[in-house]
Amino acid sequence: MFPLNTLAGGPMSAGALQKIAYVLLLGLVALASSGVL
């Protein structure tokens, strides 16, 4: 787990947030395509 201060204002915060958002988006697409949503 990353420290909250790293996620909030660290140099890797933008990349980490984009990666998390991308993974969540892929998960939603997978659920929708399988008919769960």
Image (cartoon, helix red, strand yellow):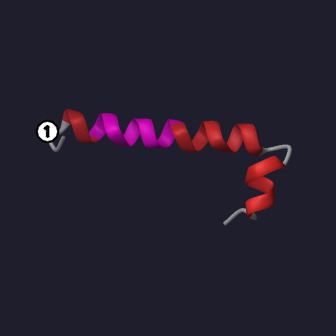
Q: Position of residue 24 (x, y in %)?
A: 45, 43
Q: Residue at x 75, y 64 (%)?
A: 3
Q: How many marks?
A: 1
**In the image, is residue 21 part of the stretch drawn in magenta?**
no
Quadrant where the N terminus sits is bottom right
Q: Nearer the viewer, residue 9 or 16?
A: 9
Work out which residue is located at the far right of the displayed protein and give it.
11
What residue would you read off at disc 1? 35
Q: Is 12 located above or below residue 29 in the figure?
A: below
- The three-letter amino acid code for the residue at tag 1 is Gly
Q: Is residue 19 above or below residue 3?
A: above
Q: Which residues are magenta?
A: 22-30
Identify the image quadrant of the C terminus.
top left
* Residue 27 among those drawn in magenta: yes
Residue 30 left/right relative to 18? left
Tag 1, which secondary structure? loop
